[in-house]
Amino acid sequence: MPDPNLASAVSSLLSTSRWAGAALARAEVLLNSGGADEDAARILYDSGCYTLTKARALIPELKTGGFVALIEDRTRTGSAENPVTKLFPAAVTERHFLACLDEITAGQPDLTYSDARFSGHTLVDFTLHQGDIALPVNVKNAGTRFENASSLVGLEPDDCIPIPAYKAHDAIEKEPNLIYVFAIDYRLTTKIETHLLTHLNAQEAAVWKLLNTKAGSRIRDAEDKFIYSTVEKYWPQFTAECPLPGFRAISARRAIRILQTQPKRTPGIGLRAWGTGASAEVNVHVSIHSETKPWDELHQRILSSGLTDIVAAINRKRTEVVFDPEL
């Protein structure tokens, strides 16, 4: 039988979500309160997941079986599809860096930032602004240690972070001043499961369970809204229980320079039979200690010399003799 409490929980917590399941839940709540069939069908249609004809046809099933029965099951359940292992760490890391941005812009009226995380921009999460100077930032969590780093790329596992080569190339074409900031925490997923998800109330726990078992059109929108709102709500409790690491920064330009000068750091280009050693994605592997800088250092440089200093450091050039074969 339909569960009106679950429909109410989804309708409340995902009130603006474009997910088909959220639209079905909102329509069920309307019907349970005596709303008209046509108005319920319009809710489904307005979500963009159904034609009006399909929406009207679903109303009798919605009345008898409830919204959960109309949502397809999640069939891909590996770690790459699991919001805990993929989306929650990203949301936590971005929220952590947001606090760094608030700190650096406090009391600096000419220094501001913009948030592009939900704009559809795939390269930039935040951008620091000072006059006409902009510093785009991509925030990353390094949550998995590369255990074979020593034998495959010549770096110790605790001194190695990957940057997708195609993303770095794309960045220097479209956002040439982009920097990556990494929070390196190999226990972050465990911290989230132990110190964040345990705070969920009954409504939130029910919706979270549903999101882990169901899919449907625009499920990612529902996951994002639930995860980011949950992280924001429980941020004080979470950070009180789990101190988070500082950030390390490296520019996209430097990542590509490492790819060019040290191809063995990019297996798939400089290492034979790469597919037997790690994942198929072609990554540039950089040294945390010698090739990235602490965000605290950048913080102080920005406050003392402005964004111009950082942009100049990213675009530093030198003259060198290189091979230029005719043949």
Image (spheres, rainbow, N blue to C red):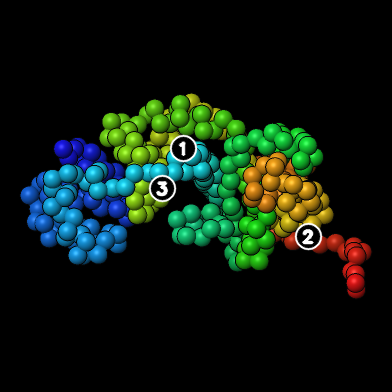
Disc 2 is placed on an element classified as: loop
Q: How many marks?
A: 3
| Camera sees residue 307 | no
Q: Quadrant of the N terminus?
A: top left
Q: Position of residue 281 (x, y in %)?
A: 64, 50
Disc number at residue 316?
2
Disc number at residue 224?
3
Give me the C-alpha separation between circle 1 and circle 3.
12 Å
Among the two numbered marks 1 and 2 on one chain, the one whose residue lies closer to the N terminus: 1
x 57%, y 48%: residue: 139
Q: Position of residue 255 (x, y in %)?
A: 72, 53
x 80%, y 40%: residue: 154
Among the two numbered marks 3 and 2 on one chain, the one whose residue lies closer to the N terminus: 3
Mark 2: few/some/many CA within 10 Å (<14, 14-19, 20+)? few
Give me the C-alpha separation between circle 3 and circle 2.
38 Å
x 13%, y 52%: residue: 60
95 displayed left or right of 153: left
Asked if residue 267 is positioned above or below residue 48 in the image, the reply reads above
Give me the C-alpha separation between circle 1 and circle 2.
39 Å
Depth check, front residue: 320 or 212 = 212
Asked if residue 82 is positioned above or below residue 23 in the image, the reply reads above
